[in-house]
Image (spheres, helix red, strand yellow):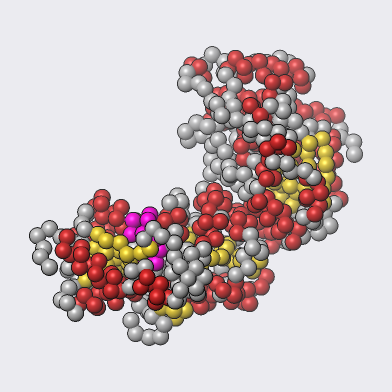
Amino acid sequence: MQLPVEKLTQLETVAYQIRRLSVEMITYGKWGHIGGSFSMAEILAVLYFHVMKVDAENPEWEHRDRLVLSKAHGSPALYAALALRGFYPLEKVYSYCELGGFEGHTDMARTPGLESSGGPLGMGLSVAVGMALGMRFKDNPRGRVFCILGDGECNEGNVWEAAMSAAHYHLDNLIAVVDYNKVMAKGFVWDEMAIEPLAEKWRAFGWEVIEVDGHDIPALVEAFYRARWILPRGKPVVVIAHTVKGKGVEMAEFNYRWHTHAPDPATADRMLRELARTYGFPEQGYSKLGEPEVKENFYGGE
Amino acid sequence: MNGAAIEMRDAFGQTLVELGAQYPNMIVLDADLHTSSKATMFKKAYPERFLQVGIAEQNLFGISAGLALSGFLPFPSTFAAFASRRALDQIAISICFPNLNVKIPGSYVGLPTSRAGASHNCIEDIAIMRALPNMRVADPADAADLRAIMHAAAEVRGPVYFRIARLAMPPIFGPDHRFEWGKGVLLREGRDVTLFGTGIMTTFCLKAADLLAHEGIRAEVVHLGSIKPIDRELIASSAARTGCAVTAENATINGGFGAAVLEVLSEECPVPVRRIGVRDRWADSGGIKELFTHHHMQPEDIAEAARKVISQKKGVQV
């Protein structure tokens, strides 16, 4: 499947901007998850700018696709994607982690375009199963529910309760995505709690499985096309996206120390310049550098 | 209190069916307990709107959240023990945090659970559920009250938790009984002590008031089916009249209904109070009467607590 060059450029730009905005939000908000936001930048770019049918002008549109971010600590990346998609003005993202602003973990009451609220891991796939059942009860065969899970999140028993039920109900309108970035909050997945053989687990639970490089935009486009239109024959589909935690900034890649960690403004500036070089955009530093609010009362830690 | 006792479970099943006719978007979900809870009546009436999730309570409440987010009116049904303990996080964050329209029946509450024992005698659900922001909590006294609570639950937007005891209760209220959130009911007027009851314990309070009447003690009886929100005005005004109070709940007294009444009284009208309920211990297997005696929750125990608080009133000699 050939992706037009302009489309590819657009998706690359969106993924880059998701990373930039994530760094800015987390620095400005003094708290957040850079590693898990970076690892799903391409996934969110492809979903919100190519795959999903949503209407930013009418977020409640009855026939929209829905996305549940089960790994809700990746909220900066999702807030950025929704802003870029036009659900609210870009500057709204800087209310992240401020009292009355966008919540640290997802709160649908505060952020237009969010389809669920979350935080504790393992719970989102059940909510997505409920939405997929709801779509079926409402006779909406073209709609899809997407649910992004973390890899470490697959330690949670609730994930497998939900997986079992999705297959039992033959929910072929449900597409789970595992952001398999290999790193949990405090170490590598295989050291903390092994989840392999992951694809075999999902197959054994009655799911169709697609494995893909989660940073390869054309491959993601192809994977979601198959997940949406080719594979659904009475089974739910999981896209296991092999990713790199912290992808895009060397100090954060595969580094659990950047799971929950806010950079200081100087580090954010370095990160943003590195992102620009890595993804081939004009070098640009941290736009809030030197703002008194950022300088005082620092520091977000674990 | 005349008329034959009615099984609360039967009233639950019948009211589910009744509501199913009224609310076409209503869905009853079950975790493999529908013949025990009597949600099976809804399954028979509306099989296409009955969803079996298996023995997976966390998934039960997560799916309910997803259905509520899609415009449905879910009633995820299971035993109170599994709702309030196993699936607390799902109820808190997937349902209460976004204030979703999910109505949660908790079956098999307190002591009468058919000898199932401590694991199934749910005593902590009132305390747990009333700690959750957005959640409403109710405990019905009889079948008419349960029916009224279920209608009120369907009418109000947001999450509701209500209790269903596995017991037949004599009717207190008539068929026209209406339930209002945050409103208690003054069942019997008195001047010497107020007995605040919730759930099936309101009947026990009425019996205690009869016992006390033989001694010339005039006990006021207030039923507080709506535990959250609670009727602050009625609690304070009754306690101001009588000067002392006893609370009674089919649950632990730690953080539950009695604690909710105490919170109001300590702020609005501090008077001597004693609480009747399970006293910081696990419940047991056993016969129903035997259990209520064992846990000092019989009408005689309520009456004895009443005598004690009356004696604690300033300047009163008993």
- Place of residue A23 in the rendered image (x, y in percent of width and height, measured from the top left): 63, 25
Q: Is residue B254 magenta?
A: yes
Front residue of A174/B190: it is B190
Q: Is residue A251 left or right of residue B187?
A: right
In which quadrant is the C terminus of chain A drawn? top right
* Magenta part of the chain: B249-259
Q: Where is residue B279 in the image (x, y as percent from the top left)?
A: 36, 60
Residue farthest bottom in this picture: B3
Quarter of the image holding residue B86?
Answer: bottom right
Question: Who's the residue at 54% across and 37% down the image?
Answer: A103
| Percent of width and height locating residue A243 | 76, 33
Note whether residue B88 is visible.
Answer: yes
Residue at the extreme right: A1
* Membership of B189 in magenta stretch: no
Tell me which residue sits at (83%, 38%) in the image.
Answer: A212
Q: Residue at x 65, y 52 (%)?
A: A158
Which residue is at a point 68% across and 45% down the rendered structure image? A155
B290, B264: nearer the viewer:
B290
Quarter of the image for the N terminus of chain A: give it: top right
The answer to whether residue A100 is left or right of residue A42 is left
| Foreground residue among A224 and A159 | A159
- Left or right relative to B40: residue B155: left
Measuring from the top left, give residue B18's x and y in whole percent.
53, 75
